[in-house]
Amino acid sequence: MKLLKNKTDQEIIHLYIQGDENGLKELVDRYKRKVYTSIYVRVKDSYLAEDLFQDTFIKVINTIKSGRYNEEGKFLPWVMRVAYNVVIDHFRKQKRAPTIVNSDGYDIFEVLVFSDDNAENVMVKNQIDKDLKRIIQLLPDDQKEVLIMRHFCGMSFKEIAEITDVSINTALGRMRYALANLRRKIEEHNLTFHF
């Protein structure tokens, strides 16, 4: 195993393709922290992040074993892109925006307390949350993606641009369009939000 630590990612991939299962273990060990963290930052749930991490490496293994891995790029950026796509696919399947979670693991919408919260205020707030999440889902995928990454995951526009493989100006433009479309859809649905 010590011999693998001195090898490049490409050399290890070739060994893995030739049947050396330790190659896969070495690649996972090298990058598990970065890949897991990139997933966790987006989903804010350790159990879900673990599941999506495993899904990511299943896709990586399948791609390598099928001979479809392209060695033109570097291994880590490719794996990060696979992880990003796995997360986006998960949210598309869920048909919902990620929840905003505080450090204790609770959905912030569920734990926010207002000084004069009575039953009516709580019901209104819950309805606003549902309406807002529903309207976000009506946005085009590229706009929804940037909005979720920026506001729900707290990512910078530079990080968003790198992950989505677009320029920072394109990421900023998508956010501008997302916010404009969000305002328009709120007006179309005659919703009123008081923040």
Image (cartoon, grey):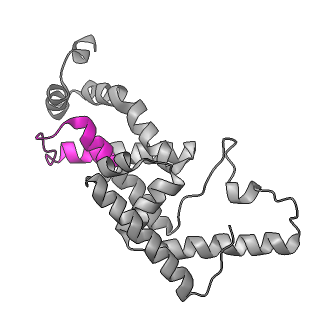
Viewer can see residue 138: no
Residue 64 in the image: above or below residue 184: above
User: 91 left or right of 1?
Assistant: right
Residue 193 in the image: above or below residue 108: below
State yes or no: residue 69 in magenta. yes
**x and y percent of residue 144 in the render?**
43, 66
Stretch in magenta? 58-83
Identify the residue at the far left of this view.
72
**x and y percent of residue 126 in the render?**
72, 70
Q: Look at 35% across and 46% down and name the residue there.
A: 158
Viewer can see residue 195: yes
**x and y percent of residue 57 in the render?**
34, 42
Q: Look at 33% across and 58% down and name the residue there.
A: 171
Location of the C terminus by quadrant is bottom right
Location of the N terminus by quadrant is top left
**x and y percent of residue 47 in the render?**
56, 44
User: 185 left or right of 60?
Assistant: right
Residue 122 in the image: above or below residue 70: below
In front of the other: 185 or 9: 185
Q: Look at 76% across and 56% down and name the residue there.
A: 112
User: 26 left or right of 145?
Assistant: left
User: 69 left or right of 106?
Assistant: left
Q: Look at 44% across and 59% down and name the residue there.
A: 90
Q: Main secondary structure of the magenta part?
A: helix
